[in-house]
Amino acid sequence: MLLALIVFTLVLYQGLENFELVLASLVFVWRLISPFIFGAALAYFLRPAYLWFLEVLKKIVRIKNRKFDGVYSAIALLLLLITFSIFITGLAFFVVPELVQSAKSIGDNLPTFIKHIEGLFATLSKQYAWAELFTSFSWSSILNEVTSFVQNIVMALFANLSGITSGFYRFTITLIFALYLVIEPKDVIKPIHWIFDHTISDPVKKRVTSILDIAKDVMSRYIKGTLLDALMVGILFFISLTLMGIPSAMLVSFLQMIANLIPVFGALIGALLSAVLIAVVDPSALVPFFILVIVIQQVDANLLQPKIIGESVGLPGVY
């Protein structure tokens, strides 16, 4: 124990002394393994669609000869690629431009919004002492700091995205590995079974395998149910906001969809952030927006989540 502590201390000391080298090494390793990590994540979401296409094909053709399994697999994979391409194209040509336009509209209205805020606190400070505290703030400087912070985050996200898919080589590896996992996921876990076979006894292996299978199945269904629920909430918001004429419908709906993935406080966080975005463009739309949030969250909590997530993990809606 003492020897291990000494070794750990020496390694930690050398790591801190050569922090830049260690960081560069970690970045290099990340760049090597990131295509496989993102490929595995992509395969996790693509495989259910592949299995669905495969099942539908077998029901339509009804040829049970095992020689046709490869043909079924190839056609299902082709349909999956076509569907995935249509989805990505739709995002690129319809959703992303709407998000950019909404963000630009909010950015154009921010200076006017800040002036209104300054005027509001200036008026309130004549009647209430606590409002004088806010009049001393430099709201323009705060706006510049927030804008700079958001820009840095966006640039960092795009830099990471560029690091993932910048080269054709890395993108090809990611896609090929994802498709390989979609078709033959068992080949990837064979080394794990080999390690189990040579390190633990059969009863323990069966017990561990059973627990892992149950955990994988429940977690998989929970994640898929949560994603489907968030997607439906986003669609409900987009349709409702568009019909009500509330500005930044696409951006607010996207934000609500992402926030809905956060447990417990996600709905509150999404509502507050969306309210700020809407207030910048059209403050008069805040009241109908909050009413809409209450209605959709009630529908989600009492209808969508019990039906989608509850049934996915095998629990009654009351849980």
Image (cartoon, rainbow, N blue to C red):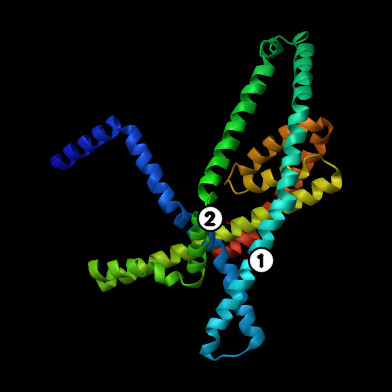
Identity, as a three-letter code, of the amino acid under mark 2: Phe
Q: Where 36 sits versus 60, above or below?
A: above
Q: How crowded is mark 1: few (under 14 residues within 10 Å), some or many (20 or more)?
A: few
Q: Residue at x 47, y 55 (%)?
A: 35
Image position of 24 (left or right of 314): left
Q: Where 141 sits versus 289, above or below?
A: above
For disc 2, the marked residue is: 168
Question: Residue 291's image quarter?
Answer: top right
Identity, as a three-letter code, of the amino acid under mark 1: Thr
Image position of 55 (left or right of 199): right
Q: Where 138 sits versus 202, above or below?
A: above
Q: Position of residue 131 (x, y in %)?
A: 71, 13
Residue that lies at the very extreme toward the front in this rendered image? 168
Front residue of this view, candidates 214 and 11: 11
Element carrying mark 2:
helix
Task: Determine the CA span between mark 1 and mark 2.
Answer: 21 Å
Front residue of this view, candidates 127 and 275: 275
Front residue of this view, candidates 244 and 307: 244
Q: Dividing the image into 4 quarters, which one contains the N terminus? A: top left
Residue 83: give its label: 1
Q: How crowded is mark 2: few (under 14 residues within 10 Å), some or many (20 or more)?
A: few
Instruction: Indicate which label's residue lies in the foreground, 1 or 2.
Output: 2
Q: Where is residue 277 in the image (x, y as percent from the top left)?
A: 73, 34
Q: Where 188 sits versus 280, above or below?
A: below
Q: Residue at x 41, y 47 (%)?
A: 30
Q: Can residue 2 be seen in this view?
A: yes
| Total labels drawn | 2
Compare marks 1 and 2 and give the one earlier in the sequence: 1
Q: Which residue is drawn at 44% across and 62% down?
A: 215
Q: Position of residue 109 (x, y in %)?
A: 78, 28
